[in-house]
Image (cartoon, helix red, strand yellow):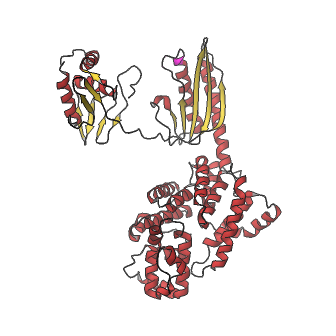
Amino acid sequence: MDLVSSGEKTQGLDFGQLQIDPECMFVHRNGRTVRFTRSERALLLALIGNPRRLMSRSRLLDEIATRISEPSDRNIDFLVNRLRSKLGDNAKAPAFIATQYGEGYLWIATPAPPPPLDAFLVIDLTSELDGHPFRRQASVLMDRLQDALSAGIGPVRKVANLDKLLRVVPEKSRYSLQVSFHADHGRLSSAAALREMPSKRIMKTFRLQLDVEDDASFAAEALRVSAGVVDALEQAQKEASSGLGISEDDAIEARFESASKLLSADNPKWLAKGDLLGKIRQQNPQDSDAALQWCLHLFSKLVLTEPFAGMRLEERDRTETEIESTVLDCLPGIGSNPLLMLAAAKLLYFINRGHLDLAEEIAERAFPPTQDFTAALPILGQLKYARGRYDEAVKLFDRGIDLATPGSEFHWHMRVLKCLALVAAGHSGASAAQATDIGNFGAGSLREINLMLGWMTASPDLPLPPASETALKELGAAGAARGLEYLYFSSARHITLETGRSNVMRAMIAHVSRLHGRQAIPDLVLRGVGAAPSS
């Protein structure tokens, strides 16, 4: 493990049940704090500073002598045993300190990796400054960059300096500003590259003009580079929130909020725009943006149809075929527009025609520019849901729930998606409903959808609540069958695991069978959940 610069501090080490503090003054072991003597601490520092390297007794004695003022304990074996006792280690089956008989000891434990740094922008120093002739000036520049970028980006989004974070891998960072230095004949050269993460795509580069004799030049260049970075980030956010008819005059946050609404499952705007979109399509059939908006109109016809009247299977098939062919034709022209890519991924996922891999690829490519906003979360979660990775889906839906305005349609939409994921994963309907509070919807939700969610989350073995039972009876066998088809097409068929599809459909199938007979269950639903078609 690396020791920090000139001091004796180390990074805090986490070994699960054992955590060693950064200065090796004490250890947290199974919830208890155990402190070290000076000799024990000196020995521990010597061992962990040379991981998996055999340390002879004489070498360890020298290490102890340099770290404490009065090395009175020179019995290394005795000191190792004391240290093992405090670490909870076993000499016969060591987890931390192994014995090489006749030769010495070695530290064999591997710490858990540090958690990924979660920051909007990280400033990543790519040059090694130890021994660098202009280390002080380089450090000044890094500090000035962090201050200027933090001021320009604002307090809501975190700017982190990796040089001060012991090179923690920025796995969850949104952007990276990579800075390099080069000293040559008394001159300091520096360059910086702004990258989008995790793709590492270069967005903008900078060449810094630095005068090592004038600290003012470092401050001026930090301000110039920071201003360029902020401009590039703002432009990237504008580009990421363009399309789908969103006004370019709106603020960035408002544009992404609009995108989240437009990409939600049941936005009625697309139904109302059908005539207008049809005319635009006729005028410019090569416009990918207009084409995908038209597909969202067709999609809204599928999901906003009256569930118990239903849509004939032939009409559904024609509509989905048109969506499929239009989206596939659009793909070559939308690779630089994240919102259009998300729309395409959403549509390919929904029609369920073998394009799941393609939808995942498109969504993942679209996600980096939009990850600070909610627009991408529903489709990313649904793609995990389709693969049976329900825990990952729930995490994405929870993030959307946290970011959404309470009581909004988007908030409701994310709660429904989470409920479906929990039911598909095998949770009882009652526990899924309670976890998502689906019985307390906003005014914008449809009564018919509420009824079906109630039937889906009810126990299949118990009678329905009276009002719900009456509503299902009054549908008749035909209406109940259409409702089952709607639930299957909208929420179950996408799941690749048969058990997941069965879990989503089980309760409603049971209640429809009880009230209207097995013959009321559509054959396509029975085949989809692995049951024999009705005769």
Q: Is residue 164 left or right of residue 290?
A: left
Occupied quadrant, residue 53 = top left
Residue 259: give x, y in percent of width and height: 63, 56
300 or 256, nearer to the observer: 300
The magenta stretch is 130-136
Name the outermost residue toward the front.
102
Q: How many marks?
A: 0
Q: Is residue 83 left or right of residue 506?
A: left
Above or below 112: residue 370 = below
Occupied quadrant, residue 378 = bottom right
81 or 56, nearer to the observer: 56
Residue drawn where x is 63% and y is 23% of the image: 220
Magenta-colored stretch includes residue 111:
no
Residue 118: give x, y in percent of width and height: 48, 41
Q: Main secondary structure of the magenta part?
A: loop
Occupied quadrant, residue 302 = bottom right
389 or 168, nearer to the observer: 389
Quadrant of image for the N terminus? top left
182 or 518, nearer to the observer: 518
Whether residue 467 appears in this view of the structure is: no
Name the outermost residue toward the top.
185
Residue drawn where x is 50% and y is 61% of the image: 385
Whether residue 170 appears in this view of the structure is: yes
Residue drawn where x is 40% and y is 78% of the image: 460
Residue 24: give x, y in percent of width and height: 30, 29
Residue drawn where x is 79% and y is 61% of the image: 285
Magenta-colored stretch includes residue 134:
yes
Residue 495: give x, y in percent of width and height: 51, 65
Above or below 282: residue 129 = above
